[in-house]
Image (spheres, rainbow, N blue to C red):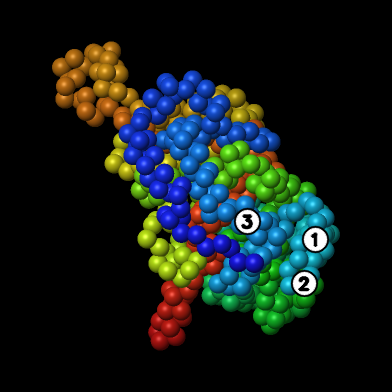
Amino acid sequence: MALKNVNPTKTTAWSKLEQNFEEVKNIHLRTFFNENLNRKEDFSINFNDFLIDFSKNRISKDTLTLLLELVEEVDLKDAISKYFGGDIINETEERAVLHTALRSQSNNEIIVDGKNILPEIKKTLKKIEAFSNKIISGDWKGHTGKKITDIVNIGIGGSDLGPDMVVDALKYYKNHLNIHFVSNIDGDHVQEVIKNLNPETTLFVIVSKTFTTQETLTNAQTIRKWFLNSADEKAIGKHFVAVSTNLKSVAEFGIDSNNIFPMWNWVGGRFSLWSTVGLSISLAVGFKNFNQLLVGASEMDEHFKNEPFEKNIPVILSLIGVWYNNFFGSETEVILPYSQYLNKLSAYLQQAIMESNGKSVDRNGNRVNYQTGSIIWGSAGTNAQHAYMQLVHQGTKLIPADFIGFEKSLYANEEHHNKLMANFYAQTQALAEGKTREEAHLDLKHQGKFNQIEKLLPFKVFEGNKPTNTILIKKLTPKNLGSLIAMYEHKIFVQGIIWNIYSFDQFGVELGKELAHKIYANQ
Ligand code: F6P
């Protein structure tokens, strides 16, 4: 069944939120904390290894109540059951949206086109496992009898960003295989990757859901030619595998049918790392770790499906996002993982979030008269502090931030980790509290700058009142990473429901592709 169709701005909750905004917009976070000494506990959620502290947001208890009324009015409950149940909620492409089925740990049937899809998912996972084991153990030999040492993932967008981000994030858990990613159609990208590779010991994984993407097919053909300089066609079977829904085109490319890892139309590219698109992840960290990623995501799925909305992490984070986007008029959100391993998380989330909710037509086909998807950006802290955080602290824009940190570091280097986390907490405190005129005055006095106080004072004041979510996780494990990614996936879903848009198509990228083809043909 189709999703319901509710204009959020016509709900009673929305009008009440508009009134509430007038009451709350000038209240400083310092005041919120002074008035409620339990604010941190009242505005926190625990889930497995996660603590989500959303107390440093410009919301009152009433705001939260009204935001929760909003999701009742747009009938989020009904939407969640359609999402997990395999209803055709991607209506413009006439597809179900079932990346959650890929990681389901339950045996409950999920029916698509009259067929339970779970057996095929399990069979494909087994194929990923068997293949990963053979490559990692060295049982699989290249065409000259040598073991595989290098893997090249050829894909773009969802067929690149997810695996690339996860392989980087789980570097600590990596085996001996070297994993490379080729995505850009810029020929220098592919040349830089292949220039130091030995074709005899390299496996190429061509990842394209549609197997029509210009970048991926061009890169794959270039690599194929390069490979055939030192091998004959028969060798391809030992060195090329493909992930796709388009089995016909993969076969035409010359890939052995045993080397095809199937994908399904009910998995969106930007949500596909849980599928065969994650093959490079399984090769890099082993199937056990890949499976743990799925388990973590599945646990977040269960939390999202079952927790009451006031204790539901993706729901709360979505509502807070809507609050800044639609009431405060914030244009962007910054995502700041305090872990170098997660440096690519924001780039990955840019596609997931912006390709999903960058829409301006509602589910009735009408242009919306309210804001939808935010602009997402960010990178790892502490580096971010020495790059753009000045603007977040003292600029004119209100930029809500997600701070993601880990209680323990992987190499247990306490000195470094304590310094890292001191910065993590310092940033959220500085953003929330700021520094008053009086405090800045006192600082300048202590520094002995008596003659410059009047001149410097305006520049030394921090307004504060800058909102943050603190996402504190025990440790960066494959399972916790799975939960973290799934958390953002469901945040995307909830916001799409509230904004009454279709989150799972991406027609906006088509026009540029069409024109590029025309321009190229006429060159
Ligand atoms: O950028 C548009 C897009 O269609 C993405 O949605 C997708 O992840 C990417 O291209 C790659 O598509 P494919 O896996 O079909 O090559």
Q: Residue at 57% across / 54% down in the picture?
A: 75
Q: Which mark is residue 109?
A: 1
Q: From the viewer's perspective, is the residue at label 2 or at label 3 nearer?
A: 3
Dividing the picture into quarters, in which one does residue 86 lie? bottom right
**Residue at the front extreme of this rendering:** 12
Q: Which mark is residue 359?
A: none
Looking at the picture, tell me which residue is in the foreground, 454 or 181. 454
Is residue 245 at all visible to an observer of this figure? yes
Disc 3: residue Cβ within 8 A of ligand 1's nearest atom: no
Query: What residue sits right under mark 2 in the picture?
Result: 114
Q: In the rendered structure, which amino acid carries the disc numbered 3?
A: Asp
- Residue 474's place in the image compared with 332, above or below, is above
Do callouts 1 and 3 mark residues in contact (Cβ within 8 Å)? no
Q: Position of residue 257 (x, y in %)?
A: 78, 76
Query: What residue sits right under mark 3 in the picture?
Result: 78
Q: Residues within 10 Å of mark 2 (few under 14, many from 20)?
A: few
Identify the mark nearer the N-term, 1 or 3.
3
Q: Residue at 44% across / 33% down in the picture?
A: 60
Q: For mark 2, give the secondary structure.
A: loop
Q: Residue at 72% across / 58% down in the picture?
A: 101
